[in-house]
Image (cartoon, coloured by chain):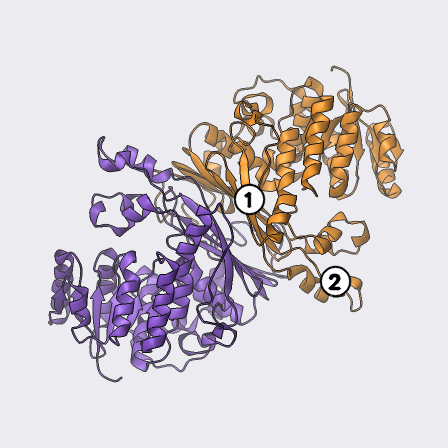
Chain colours: A orange, B purple
Amino acid sequence: MNKTIKLGVIGLGARGYSLLKDVLLPMSGEELETAAVCDTYADRAERAADEIGRATGKRPFLTTDSDKLLGAGIDAVLISAAWEAHIGLAVAAMRKGICVGLEVGGAYCLEDCFRLVRAFEETGTPCMLLENCCYGKRELMALNMARQGVFGEIVHCSGGYHHDLREEIASGKENRHYRLLNYLNRCCENYPTHELGPIAKLLGVNNGNRMLSLTSTASAARGMHEYCLTHREKGHPLAQAEFLQGDVVTTVIRCAGGQTISLTLDTTLPRAYSRAFTVRGTKGAYFGETDSIFLDGVHNEYDFTPEKLWGNAKDYEERYLDRHWRRYDPKGGHGGMDWLVMSAFLESVRSGKRPPIDVYDAAAYMAITPLSEESILRGGAPVAIPDFTGGRWHRRRDIEEGFWALDLPEGNELLCGE
Amino acid sequence: MNKTIKLGVIGLGARGYSLLKDVLLPMSGEELETAAVCDTYADRAERAADEIGRATGKRPFLTTDSDKLLGAGIDAVLISAAWEAHIGLAVAAMRKGICVGLEVGGAYCLEDCFRLVRAFEETGTPCMLLENCCYGKRELMALNMARQGVFGEIVHCSGGYHHDLREEIASGKENRHYRLLNYLNRCCENYPTHELGPIAKLLGVNNGNRMLSLTSTASAARGMHEYCLTHREKGHPLAQAEFLQGDVVTTVIRCAGGQTISLTLDTTLPRAYSRAFTVRGTKGAYFGETDSIFLDGVHNEYDFTPEKLWGNAKDYEERYLDRHWRRYDPKGGHGGMDWLVMSAFLESVRSGKRPPIDVYDAAAYMAITPLSEESILRGGAPVAIPDFTGGRWHRRRDIEEGFWALDLPEGNELLCGE
């Protein structure tokens, strides 16, 4: 495909709009046109269309009906709508031959994950999960170090979504915010893909490895209730609301290769943002919480101090920084991750090659949500994680191809950005 | 009891000997005499007896037979032998009316934990688990803050024993080191009481709260094997050995009060020491990994930086440091924790009052080991944790008494040390 990619965007709330402003519009030009926008709320679609018109001189097709957007002659679609719309929209797009870039979020039932996989297998239309944390500076550096053997054999990883969302969930805009109903009505690992995405890539999940089973345990739900009691006026519905979503959900995953993954959802208690990305191997470790690298024989038992290990990962950048971060100094949202993930998506649309986080990855990561819900309901019982590849994970090696390859030729203009 | 406490010590390996040198001998005098020592290995007992003779001018009774030590007219016994000897020795001592100070370590079967409880209930002889981390500077400060409501309602805690023991386990002294056989032959949370002890005290376990169930998941066992391959000569038995103990064991515990506890055993991969003690509440948090305190409304979302939050707990010492640390500047092993735990034990022997970490606490904490083994064997299945108090946890409030009391009168000479 050498022509301009005509992209549609479905969902222009906070996430879709920021991707538009920070990434898509700066990338727009001969290779990319944001040709159509859609949101259930007309004002959001209009704000986005205005923004595109201002930035490019060409106002996009605008609709509140996703079917119409998918019929508007686009090559690819970015789905950044509410979580519950993701899989249905992705399947509909694939059936029309429109390449899918799917924003993150967990599934609601396991069967939806299989629908996603079958839609791809029946149509051959690529679908990529836009898990931006797979493109984080430290996540890609750790992947690079792991593949060079610096950590030895990796046996355990951990990470989580540690992000105080209380204000966002209970803000004045609650009837338009998709998270609120999820926090009122569900209790699960509702946002697993940060940091599961980077960890799964590092452990070769769906590529010689797979996730076998999980257990999930939820703490009591106290954070939202206490927040609403003190931050909403008396008599406000939320001040009386009972939230089902436990404050901290701990999920432990076992992999075929013997590795374990510990995932934490932690979004309704006061704290500072962290993904706590951690990689543990027989020769070394990366600790995201303190941005520390520990190497066997180099560092010592009592070095876990501000002076010695804390923040020392930057000393390893010169040697181990991922080539994308080294060459291109990515711009755009979320410290460049959004820029890189969108570049990788558009590159896969252009080349027709398997996207770096494909439909099997998407299904496996998104399945954690309903499986964690089941495990919590069953008192922490272990629950099997399906093999969405149907046994092909033994031989799949996407880690050696495309974006994940160790030594790509230079000169990808799209990756360079403007 | 106003006379000198005559103390026996069983087990004078690394742990017993360091407690003797760093804590017991400096405390010795009119109130304490280490009157008898015992070790299966005569040379260890002799080294200890020599040390005591040198320091005090009075050589203790010396034996390799623990029955003889328990018959030597002692008031109290410190049990710092191999893990597998702990409960049998504690029960035997209680049956002779000898107060027990029990070094930490997990149990081997659940029934042993009940034996410990029944021996106490039948004899009334106090038994204290000497969990020194309950007396850590930050652990006591966090307890103090929690009890003053600084963290709001606590909903989740985590911690672990993150200590690279590879050299210790596989050292030249392996046939005398009790850890080796455990790592070869078991796979479990083999050392749960750091940080479970401090967390359980903070959450009121056995005092209005209790631990209900757990799940445990073990990673593959790679660290020891790789270490032995590279650090032992070819043909050495350990270079061929297969270790059963998984490198990282993640245990998640649910409490009656809705709190969850995440515990990690992490002793056979390269890293620096940490207990990663973490307390999460509706108004604030303590993060041991970065020694950070986060308070709602005071700190901000993106403050998790070296400049802002990392290491800021020291700024709260003036206001919240525990009175023991504030008044006495504890000396002795492990940064003063050993001094404080031993002081608390000797104080309970002297006063005859319930020790601050009593036999019900010991049973509950030590039970985590066989229960984690069962959960791992059953693929991570949730396993019920018995109520060792027989329903008395509803009403028990040791947290308001003795060592844990908020406002003890000053002037405990023993606590002051020399």
| Mark 2 vs mark 1, CA separation in Å | 30 Å
Which mark is on residue B4? none
In screen coordinates, is A194 left or right of B49?
right
- Check the image and report above or below for A19 versus A160: above
Q: How many marks?
A: 2
Q: Residues within 10 Å of mark 1 (few under 14, many from 20)?
A: many
Q: Are marks 2 and 1 in contact (CB under 8 Å)?
A: no
The answer to whether any part of residue A272 appears in the image is no
Name the residue type under label 2: Ala
- Observer-nearest of A190 and B271: A190
Residue B323 in the image: state x and y as whole percent. 42, 73
Question: Which residue bears the numbered disc 1?
Answer: A214
Report in which chain the residue with disc 2 lies.
A
Q: Compared with residue B83, is residue A42 higher up or lower down, i.e. above or below? A: above
Residue A345 in sight here: yes
For mark 2, give the secondary structure: loop
**Relative image position of residue A50 (x, y in whole percent):** 86, 36
Question: Which of the 4 image quarters holds residue A379?
Answer: bottom right
| In-front residue for pair B61/A277 | B61
Q: Residue at x 37, y 77 (%)?
A: B354
Res. A9 image quadrant: top right
Q: Name the image quarter holding the C terminus of chain A.
A: top right
